[in-house]
Amino acid sequence: MSALLQVRALSKLFPAGGGRRLRAVDGVSLELEAGETLALVGESGSGKSTVARCLVRLVEPSGGEVTLDGQSILSLPPKALARQYRRIQMVFQDPNASLNPRMRVREVLEEPLRLHLDLAPPARADRACELIERVGLGVVHLDRYPHELSGGQRQRVGIARAIAVSPDIVILDEPTSSLDVSVRGQILDLLLDLQQRLGLAYLFISHDLQVVRHVADRVAVMYLGVIVEQGPTERVFAEPRHPYTRALLSATPMARWGIARTRLRLVGEITSPIDPPDACRLVGRCPLAQPSCAARRPELIDLGDRHAVACPIATQSPHPGAPLRAANERIPTC
Ligand SMILES: Nc1ncnc2c1ncn2[C@@H]1O[C@H](COP(=O)(O)OP(=O)(O)OP(=O)(O)O)[C@@H](O)[C@H]1O
Ligand SMILES: [Mg+2]
């Protein structure tokens, strides 16, 4: 049986002047099952938002295949495409930028209903009331403009807009990072509550690994346009295999998580995403690199239990997280 959403070899190349191309997304493959949360993590510029934007067609993918319930959606005719795209909605990082400042909340919520569902105006008005209450606001907020709401309230409206047309999948692109720390937890709780009630699948993009560990069933780690590791969240956090994942986790204070890990620091220059060589993208920074890493781009190697890593050297490690070089320093178990 195929996954709810399957992404195969997705790529997005942006022109970078002089005939060169920036490989923002370069052969990304992902699967998302109904009702689960897959987190997409990686440092700034690794291509997370571009993957999200390709999936909702805010940018046109350069290549690859995306299927929803087994049906390819990149090549559908416009009407069928709109029907399928109702099923994938997105919540953006910055609700200030993603809500039209000239539309009252009521119009923000009724717009997708008008575009995607054949509802009469009274039914649309009823649905707007139901939605605003579902995200923890009151009908009084329907007549407000975005600038009359707090940041947290605006993000609640962004979430209400995303769930308005009963999607199966919601892409959350750093949904709390622009918000005050005091309201982040409330918005996360709301998202978890909605997921349970509505059976939503989330593609959850975040820099906050502690939040990822809390909310995600599986995690995919991106580096310079490619997925270098993916697997069940607990397993990736407890036994990170790819040097990049290990470095990423090393940079996060996780003492209270009680996980024994091996610290790994990246050194050297970041590879340019503009026409990069056909090699491991981490080769210039990886303390474990060997000559073969510069010779070809590593494929994801299946480690079992849905854990996969794009590093043949990591798979040769005697046990996960074991220090392969003296330079790596051991972090004691808490
Ligand atoms: N419209 C665009 N035109 C040209 N280059 C772009 C465009 N959008 C993104 N890029 C480039 O693509 C790469 C990936 O960007 P993207 O925004 O997807 O990264 P990200 O992982 O979401 O980063 P962040 O964590 O900072 O949000 C970056 O090098 C970025 O500069
Ligand atoms: Mg981004």
Image (cartoon, rainbow, N blue to C red):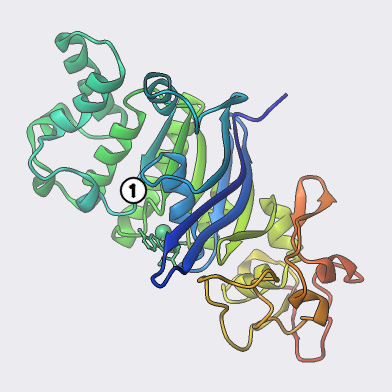
Percent from the top left, x then y, of residue 257? 64, 64
Residue 255 appears in the rendering: no
Label 1: which secondary element: loop
Q: Is residue 231 left or right of residue 199?
A: right
Question: Circle 1: is it few (<14), some (14-19), or many (20+) Cα within 10 Å?
Answer: many
Query: Which image quadrant: the N terminus?
Result: top right
In the figure, 211 relative to 247: above or below?
A: above
Percent from the top left, x then y, of residue 299? 76, 58
In the figure, 218 relative to 317: above or below?
A: above
Q: Name the residue furthest front.
A: 19
Q: For residue 253, which quarter of the picture?
A: bottom right
Q: Is residue 198 left or right of residue 241?
A: left
Depth check: give the residue in front, 229 or 329. Answer: 229
Q: Name the residue furthest right.
A: 318
Q: Amino acid at mark 1?
A: Phe
Q: Is residue 103 left or right of residue 11?
A: left
In the figure, 256 relative to 329: above or below?
A: above
Percent from the top left, x then y, of residue 127? 24, 18
Depth check: give the residue in front, 97 or 132. Answer: 97
- Quadrant observed for ligand 2 in the rendered image: bottom left
What residue appears at the point 81 percent right and 82 percent down from the top-left corner? Answer: 291
Q: For residue 110, which quarter of the picture?
A: top left
What residue appears at the point 54 percent right and 46 percent down from the top-left corner? Answer: 63
Figure disc tally: 1
In the figure, 57 relative to 229: above or below?
A: above
Query: Which image quadrant: the C terminus?
Result: bottom right
According to the picture, the residue beneath numbered tag 1 turns out to be 92
